[in-house]
Image (cartoon, rainbow, N blue to C red):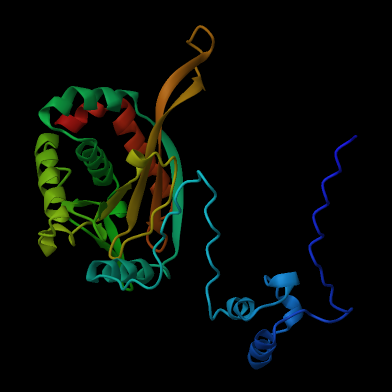
Amino acid sequence: AKPAAAAAAPAKPAWTPAPGVVAATPTARALAKKAKVDLSTIAGTGEFGRVTADDVRIATGEKQPERPKRAAGAAAPVEMPSGLVPFTGMQRAVSNNMVATLNIPVFRCTREIVMDKFDSLYQSVKPKGVSVSALLAKAVALAVEKHPICNSEFSEEGTIFKPDVNIAMAVAIEGGLITPVLKYANERNVVELAENWKELVGKAKSNTLAPDEYSTGTFTISNMGMFGVTEFGAILPTGQGCILAVAATQEKIVPDDRAVLGLKKEKRMTVTLTCDHRQIYGADAAMFLKTLADIVENKSETLLL
């Protein structure tokens, strides 16, 4: 004889509210009435889909929803920061400086610079302790020297030209941002600049920079190339006319009539110049970038003078 079929499991009891009626617990109804919340807009999580008191509290923001339970074998949840963290003095200063220039009419110019010769030069001087930052500062300083308008500051009476070329470079430090300054960068050799820059970065990280070492810049460089950023624009600092945003160097395939296949591989870096349009015009920015590109691409040996 065939074995008797197993008894079917009893069906799970179900309940459906009458049309137009929202299933909710008495406490949930009282809370919703007090908060003036329409119960029909709240998804119920209680038995039979009832709206519970916690559902109402979550809907009104009185309670945070519970984090879903982690599935077996899933990665542990990451605890994200929550709540207000007051600014440090440095963060407040950075914030105020950023806001201070927002009403200045600025414009931006972007161009690519071929970096093959620059990179070869860097590899040759790297054993002497010369950094990319020092080489960039020197190149920018030499370009600024030929375009003094980019080393200027606006005033209501006219344009204030700065007699010294002091290159500030942004450095991210614990809890903020600061711009140590390489003074007279156009007049000093790159080895000296590299030694000075290493000292300034050390002071920045230990919070021992003197005011004169971070507040005397006449032109600023913001370099995010080491993070792989391919292009960006920087916010103009107070008291300056220009800031140069330096992005990552990338290998690109470009046309070349002299190559066998009509193509060649080059290293190119994208730079974006932000200018105060009250005293600096588009042609000024374009000519500055052209000069900078010429120095880097064709006259890199001048960086060692």
Q: Residue at x 28, y 41 (%)?
A: 143
Q: Residue at x 33, y 73 (%)?
A: 156
Asked if residue 158 lies left or right of residue 190, the reply is right
Q: Residue at x 67, y 70 (%)?
A: 45
Asked if residue 233 lies left or right of residue 145, the reply is right
* Front residue of 32 and 255: 32
Q: Residue at the front extreme?
A: 1
Residue 183 visible (yes or no): no
Q: Residue at the bottom extreme?
A: 34
* The N terminus sits in image quarter: top right
Residue 142, position in %: x, y? 23, 40
* Front residue of 162 and 303: 303
Q: Residue at x 26, y 61 (%)?
A: 175
Residue 248 visible (yes or no): yes
> Picture quarter containing residue 141?
top left
> Picture quarter containing residue 133?
top left
* Front residue of 245 and 72: 72
* The C terminus sits in image quarter: top left
> Picture quarter containing residue 217?
bottom left
Residue 28, position in %: x, y? 66, 84
Is the residue 163 above or below the residue 265 in the image? below
Is the residue 159 above or below the residue 34 in the image? above
* Front residue of 271 and 178: 178
Residue 52, position in %: x, y? 66, 78
Is the residue 7 above or below the residue 123 in the image? below
Residue 266, position in %: x, y? 42, 22
